[in-house]
Amino acid sequence: MAATASMLTAAPLQAQESLGIVQSATAVAVAQLETVTVKGRHYDNALGSSDAASQGVVRAELLNSRPLLRPGEVLEAVPGLVVTQHSGDGKANQYFLRGFNLDHGTDFATSINGMPVNMPTHAHGQGYSDLNFLIPELVDRIDYRKGPYFAKNGDFAAAGSADIAYRTTLDSPFAQATLGANGYLRLVSAGSTPMAAATTLLGAIEVMRNDGPWALKENLQRTNGVVTLAGGTRVSGWSTTLMGYDAKWQSTDQVPQRLIAAGSYQGKPFGRFDAVDPSDGGETSRSSLSANWHDSDAYGTTQVSGYAMRYRLKLFSNFTYLMDRPDTGDQFAQQDVRKVFGLSASRSIDHNWGPFIARSEVGLQIRRDRIQLGLFESQDRTITNTTRRDEVGETLLGTYAQTAVEFAPKLRGLFGLRADRLLAHVDSLLQPLNTGSAGKSLLSPKLSLVFGPWSKTEFFVNAGSGFHSNDARGMTTAANPKTGDPLDRVPGLVRAQGSELGLRTEAIPGLQSSLALWKLDFDSELTYSGDAGTTSPNGPSRRYGFEWNNHWIPRPWLLFDLDLAWTHARFKRNESDDITTGPYVPNSVDRVFTGTVTLKDRGPWTLSLTERYIGSGALTSDNSVRSSSSLLSNLRISRKLSAGSSLSLDILNLFDRHYNDIEYDYATQLKGEAAPVNDKVVHAGEPRTLRLTLRLGF
């Protein structure tokens, strides 16, 4: 049990992290397993450390060796996850995983230091997950899980989740400056210092400016700060973190493919990096205070975390140009102002379950959002008409219990049950018919079985239910806010049911390999469109696929990563009277490949080259239009100057390939067109970009 105790008590310190991030709840007797660990501090995914083949941990050492175009791309360290952008870089990224176009985060839950990032009932999109406030240099680790098999994970975690833990101490203070083309400037400074009573104070500040390759300068201005005070040990400790973030930007949103092909618009040249509406853009800010506390005794571990956050967004977009309002243009504005409060607590105990060694855990999670929302028609960022305004109070209460049992030296089990209750009240300030209250409860059972290891290979069986919440406005809206036509109200929680067969092996020295065969069914693909203020109906769906992940360290200085994912995503038309014209789920990506080779500490040099391939996907439900595949190469070359100091060159899109970050298919209308035209609209990926970073340690 010594190995178990070490592993379980290590989790709280690492973030004093998200509540209950335990590497493997079922590893109640790993001292009896033959543990073989791939050497190095890039991954903590050894045999006996997880409950599913698709669960794992990524360490800071791996993240620090890879170049990033945007902060949210740290999540691409999660195998099979793709991060892109279809608008300005101050807006939340677009995420893809397991055949989901996760939009801005609907079915992938993300947290930082135990504080959720996803926003329910958001002005732009349900589960909106803006990671632009992330400071990659502070990340200590990412704990990721895929599928609805984990009792601690609730809303938005059906496809997966990632808990990002920030450092509470730094080896030494540093100052860092990055310069790049197109007005790119990023300054970061951070340090930590011991304080009285065995506490440590950490502070970091980031300032960033960027115009990007766009004909319309992005003029992104981002300011970010973090202060953390932490104390205690792995056994008993605490931390509190204050964060502040502010950003402003102009957007070059997606543009019609026909306009790029024509090469001109209104008598002027038009290319991949031009904008149709030059007044698109936005501004956002968030400030938060979070705290975590943990304590271990002879019987088990207690963890408590809480947070308070204030958030603001103003977003101006125009995706159809002149289709609805030819005289003024179709620009619309979305506004979101909210306060968020949350609390989580859990208690785990070691005990015997009959003749078997067991560990049980119970937990409570509560979140309250108080939201002011607005959807407006606008022209050049001036409000011309109000479509809808709402005040929303939303509470999500979740409780869970799980028990991990060692039935035999080569058989472990994890049994869990989660209960969630959503309560929402919407005051529609313009349309009384859309005012109302709604609620929904859901039970989600979970099961994991782990067999082995045999010949340094273990096998996993996982099954469970999960969910995502719907926008509260869709739960109470009875009349279309634009036309007044009657609308059907939608359920508050949408169930997902998943299963997975997997294995993880270390049979080849230095190679850690995992394979997962999975399936995920959703009761509905219905979504609330913040752009329209109404619900977009779609029927139930089924996705299945496989993932093959490999981490190989043939030499202490050489690391290979190879991740392959294939997905089949379809509507279950025989079970629903949905409105789709075909079985394909639009914007689902069929194939993802990521390969990285890293040469580290070759004298003073480190090199990392990543190749990311995104396959074609259906853009329409009848598969008549498909997206183009893309291949992107990123290179980082670093030279250590002294202890804590280095000079790095990032070459993003190394071979200057033309690719699209995102593609859609829908109707738009431009000046000179008599009627709307259905066409691909695309957001160009950025061309070859060089960035030079000087880091000085003190």
Image: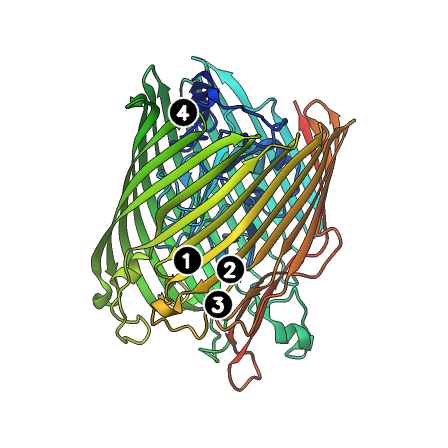
In this picture, is 194 found above or below 358? Answer: above
Q: Could you give the CA–CA distance between mark 1 and mark 3, rounded to whole angstroms?
A: 22 Å
Disc 4 and disc 2 in contact, CB within 8 angstroms: no
The residue that disc 2 covers is 568
Which tag is nearer the camera, tag 1 or tag 3? 3
Q: Amino acid at mark 4?
A: Val
The residue that disc 4 covers is 28
- Give 503 or 603, whichever is nearer the viewer: 503
Dot placed on the residue nearer the N-terminal end, 1 or 3: 1
Which tag is nearer the camera, tag 2 or tag 3? 2
- Give 35 or 182, whichever is nearer the viewer: 35
The residue that disc 3 covers is 584
Dot placed on the residue nearer the N-terminal end, 4 or 3: 4
What SS does tag 1 mark?
loop
Q: Could you give the CA–CA distance between mark 2 and mark 3, rounded to whole angstroms?
A: 9 Å
Q: Amino acid at mark 1?
A: Gly
Residue placed at 55% from the left, 74% from the top? 624
Q: Could you give the CA–CA distance between mark 2 and mark 1, rounded to whole angstroms?
A: 24 Å
Q: Amino acid at mark 2?
A: His
Dot placed on the residue nearer the N-terminal end, 2 or 1: 1
In this picture, is 95 found above or below 388? Answer: above
